[in-house]
Image (cartoon, rainbow, N blue to C red):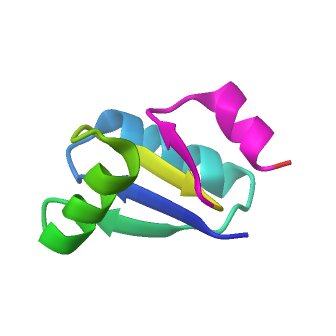
Amino acid sequence: MSIRLYSTPSCSYCRLVKDWFRARNVKFDEYNVTADQRKAEEMVCKSGQSGVPVIDVNGRIIIGFNQPELERALR
């Protein structure tokens, strides 16, 4: 399973997502879109959003900390 988290250091919802993943031992790759312009552009192309967090679970895009949607995507 491939999980990509597009985030920023100051985003409280991004921290919630990371904590939620860690509590469930879910491995993920994190990209700081304030420090990596290419990843920021990739995030906008995938989601149509410039806000974070954006989570890509095997190509399924989840915007924000949407716990029910994350649980469905991880099944």
Q: Position of residue 62 (x, y in %)?
A: 53, 40
Q: Position of residue 75 (x, y in %)?
A: 86, 48
Count of numbered marks: 0
Quarter of the figure that contains the N terminus:
bottom right
**27 to the left or right of 72:** left
**55 to the left or right of 43:** right
Residue at image position (74%, 45%) is 73
Q: Position of residue 11 (x, y in %)?
A: 27, 40
Residue at image position (21%, 60%) is 40
Query: Which image quadrant is residue 64 in?
Result: top left
Query: From which residue to which does the magenta span run?
Result: 59-74
Residue at image position (53%, 55%) is 56
Between residues 61 and 31, which one lies in front from this camera angle? 61
- Vertical placement of residue 50 versus 22, above or below: above
- Vertical placement of residue 72 versus 66, above or below: below
Q: Is residue 45 magenta?
A: no
